[in-house]
């Protein structure tokens, strides 16, 4: 397999490739770069779903390795086996609510896992090998904005949850390794993603799932929290661009320029579902619930640096992206039901255990 890997121009490890953004990224990259080998490294926690990657699972330039990024020895063996020369690092525990009730896994995966990958990158560089490390982070590391202004690449870090603190720590590790050891790194901080293959605990798929089943739609606090929403395909295009063309050592913010209050987002979802499925009005299902601790009031990304330096702009308005997302979930009920029932957890055993 090592010989086969070296026939490719580049061998890129994508950590967390069975997750929401990771699976969309691989679906974008694998058919586009046929002269690259892509190694999907994922330990398949509850949010890792290999069924999202059916379209590419048999592609010649795709491999899957079930590895926890906290397992240094397994990671090292994988990097050697495939002669990996680049990483796009998305693997992370990412659900804020879960980080509040159980922060241990967030510290372990998001900090220690990133440290392991950086150490492997450093080791390969010290052997004279070229290696790019792309760290994918979040706007939540910057904390909460007031009613005006935007997060920029120069914004101070003010994380307010165990999740965002763990991602902030990982960002700082990447910066430190760049400055201390001269690694070739790029970092991206993105706003809230939405689109196909998002695990149904997250806001948009949860609301779609509940609304189609005539269940209550729980909205935290007064619902006036504002988020900047980024369609996942636009994010993947930006990640592709930064990984290949971003300046070493730079950080790039990726935002969708789509600010909306949570309550208005849920109402808009309801209106789209009423239009497509009939019935309703599903807005009557909205229920306000106790706000979560440390809930940031507003996020908004200034992505002008990325546009100015690399020419990227999002291609989907929020209205377009939200409708596409609703239509995808309605058309892919088997995938959604597999997540809810837990059937997706058997996919690895079915597809890979006998290989």
Image (spheres, grey):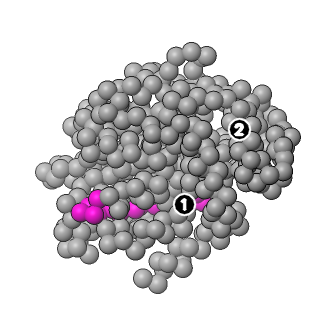
Reply above or below: 318 against 9.
above
327 or 248: which is nearer to us? Answer: 327
Which residue in the rendered view is the most extreme toward the right? 284
Q: Earlier in the sequence, mark 2 or mark 1?
A: 1
**Mark 2 vs mark 1, CA separation in Å:** 28 Å
Left or right position of 129 against 341: left
Q: Which mark is residue 268?
A: 2
**Residue placed at 52% from the left, 16% from the top?**
149
Is label 2 in a helix, a strand or a loop? Answer: helix
**Residue placed at 49% from the left, 27% from the top?**
301
Q: Which residue is mark 1?
A: 48
Q: Position of residue 55 (x, y in %)?
A: 46, 68
Q: Is residue 42 magenta?
A: yes
Reply above or below: 29 against 101.
below
* Residues at marks 2 and 1 touching, judged by CB atoms closer than 8 Å: no
Q: Position of residue 326 (x, y in %)?
A: 65, 50
Left or right position of 177 against 91: left
- Residue 210 seen in the figure: no
Circle 1 crowding by C-alpha within 10 Å: few under 14, some 14–19, many from 20: many
Q: Is residue 266 magenta?
A: no
- Specify the quadrant that holds the C terminus: bottom left
Q: Position of residue 273 (x, y in %)?
A: 73, 48
155 or 31: which is nearer to us? Answer: 31
Left or right position of 23 against 34: right
**Residue placed at 26% from the left, 75% from the top?**
1
Reply above or below: 329 against 143.
below
Total residue callouts:
2
- Residue 331 seen in the figure: yes
């Amino acid at each position: 397999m090592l010989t086969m890997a070296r026939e490719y121009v580049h061998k890129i490890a994508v950590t967390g490739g069975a997750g929401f953004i990771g699976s969309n990224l691989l679906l974008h990259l694998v058919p586009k770069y046929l002269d690259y080998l892509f190694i999907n490294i994922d330990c398949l926690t509850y949010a890792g779903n290999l069924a999202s990657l059916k379209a590419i699972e048999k592609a010649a330039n795709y491999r899957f390795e079930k590895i926890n990024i906290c397992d240094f020895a397994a990671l090292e063996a994988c990097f050697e086996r495939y002669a990996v020369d680049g990483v796009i690092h998305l693997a992370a525990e990412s659900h804020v609510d879960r980080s509040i009730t159980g922060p241990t896994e967030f510290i372990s995966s998001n900090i220690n896992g990133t440290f392991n990958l950086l150490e492997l990158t450093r080791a390969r560089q010290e052997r004279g090998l070229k290696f790019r490390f792309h760290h994918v982070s979040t706007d939540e590391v910057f904390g909460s904005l007031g009613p005006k202004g935007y997060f920029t690449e120069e914004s101070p870090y003010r994380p307010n949850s165990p999740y965002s603190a763990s991602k902030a720590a990982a960002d700082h590790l990447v910066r430190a390794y760049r400055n201390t050891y001269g690694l070739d790194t790029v970092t991206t901080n993105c706003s809230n993603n939405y689109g196909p293959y998002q695990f149904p605990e997250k806001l948009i798929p949860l609301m779609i799932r509940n609304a189609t089943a005539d269940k209550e739609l729980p909205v935290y606090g007064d619902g006036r929290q504002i988020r900047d929403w980024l369609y996942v395909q636009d994010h993947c295009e930006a990640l592709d661009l930064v990984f290949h063309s971003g300046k070493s050592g730079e950080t790039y913010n990726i935002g969708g320029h789509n600010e909306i209050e949570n309550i208005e987002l849920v109402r808009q979802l309801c209106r789209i579902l009423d239009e497509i499925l009939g019935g309703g009005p599903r807005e009557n299902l909205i229920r306000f619930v106790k706000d979560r601790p440390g809930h940031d009031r507003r996020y908004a990304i200034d992505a002008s640096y990325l546009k100015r330096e690399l020419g990227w702009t999002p291609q989907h308005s929020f209205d377009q992206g939200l409708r596409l997302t609703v239509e995808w979930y309605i058309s892919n009920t088997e995938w959604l039901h597999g997540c809810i029932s837990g059937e997706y957890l058997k996919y690895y055993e079915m597809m890979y255990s006998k290989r």
